[in-house]
Image (cartoon, grey):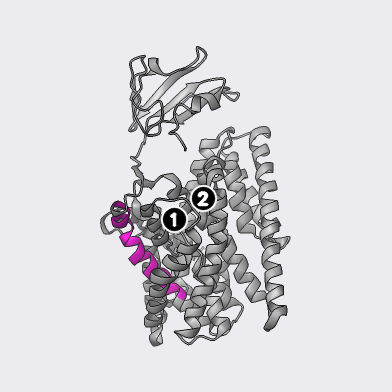
Amino acid sequence: MHDVIPFALVIAVASVALLLAVGSSRITAITQVPSPALFLIAASVAADLFPDLGALGIEVDQRIVTLALVVILFDGGMHIGLSRFRPVAGSVLWLGVAGTFVTAAGLAAAAHWWFGFDWRPALLLGTALAPTDPATVFSVLGRREVTGRSGTLLEGEAGANDPVGIALMIAILGSSGGGFGAVAHGAGEFVLQMVVGIVLGIAGGRVLRWLLRHLPMPNEALYPLRTIAFALLLYGVTTVAHGSGFLAVLLAGILVGDTRAPYKREIEHFTSGLASLAEIVAFTLLGLSIPLSSAFHDGRGALALGIAAVLILLVRPILVGLVLIPVRLRRGERAFVLWSGLKGVVPILLGTYVVVEGAPDADRIYAVVFVVVLLSVVVQGGLVPTLARRWRVPMRVVEPEPWAMGMRFRDQPEGLHRYVVESGSPADGTTLRDLPLDEDVWVSVVSRAGRMVQVRGGTTLTAGDEVLAIASDAALVAGLFRAPGS
């Protein structure tokens, strides 16, 4: 029992650190520096001051961050949902795959010709820095949420290019030698991971959707646990089958996102909170894996600054901009998407792959990736709110709504639907009595800016209102609340 007090002290210190991490959103609101940057800097400085904090080792960090990323991607997929994903699916897949390849290729060429890396280390560095992380974008925007195609495209791109970047890195590390044989082997591994990941992801999403709807649990607290356990199982099975487990959990999350199922709101709240914790843990562990002095030692800081400048000012706007040409966006939205390709957890995780495999120049690659991610989050992330306003990116302010009104039903409430009044829709500026609604349609609740609105015939709906209605034909009624062409 002699270790009870020291262990309690460790718990207390860790709890204080977690409370500070959770409260960092207040600092983000003031400084406009995303919370992930604060986690990285604080953890890396702590690793300098207390070297024993990094005693877990790079392999253990890699495994913990992998688990965290599974949760983050699954929650991200649920947040997107099938209805939001379907209209931009082609654009997301195109940008996620082609954008990853051109970014990796462009950075590899720059690292080789301008910064003196050999070709293989240059390719590993370019691949590690290819994936994006829009979670930091939405973190720095605070209560403002990017709406329209640009918001969905940013979320979808990161969801798609994370598995693509990981699969590409695994394929490169798995190939040996050079020439056509190595290229063919790497391409085959990549295609196999993508195909197996897509097939098992869709199959797993459908199975999970069936479980949520048809297999009741004895306790409501078990529903979120079962969902997360299934996502982890899907990752493990897909990875064992030589597929991209990350892609599989992302697709499963998208398929489940819009599913009406018992305790769905509780599942969403649980996965969202767990994903926030996973992000804190991931960035903190990755920060502890490399002391700040080591990251900037021996000219690595200047090297990373040069590579970051190439990435932000040349590769992303020019090469990815060419990939983005076929995608329908306004000029301001296009510029915002290109600027907001922030780096996050996945590039540093890919850097750990390089270190664990003992690739040439691994330590320098890992240090450069760490500093580039830090610069990307601080510099790009810090300018996101300002540029979003300047480019008139469509956003809405999401005010906190701490109070909820609801009723529990034993069976699924048939015909009850939730709609949001879009700007320019037939319902926008129209009274309830003037809406062309059938007799069997009943508008029961209207919420405006987080406040209840009394439902009467003369109640005028405005853009942003949330409406609960009972209707037998949901598609017909939904058209009244959607803007033309949306």
Q: Secondary structure at mark 2?
A: helix
Q: Is residue 384 magenta?
A: yes
Please state which of residues 335 and 379 is positioned toward the viewer in this rendering: 335
- Amino acid type of disc 1? Ala
Amino acid at pointer 2? Gly
Residue linked to disc 1: 135
Badge 2 is on which residue?
76
Residue contact between numbered discs 2 and 1, judged by CB atoms under 8 Å: yes
* Residue 15, visible in the rendered structure: no
Q: Residue furthest front?
A: 326
Q: Quadrant of residue 47?
A: bottom left
Along the viewing direction, whichever of 91 and 458 lies nearer the viewer: 91
Q: Main secondary structure of the magenta part?
A: helix
Q: Nearer the viewer, residue 287 or 415?
A: 415
Compared with 399, 193 (above or below) is below
Dot 1 alpha-carbon crowd within 10 angstroms: few under 14, some 14 to 19, many 20 or more: many
In the rendered image, residue 45, in percent from the top left (x then y), is placed at: 36, 73
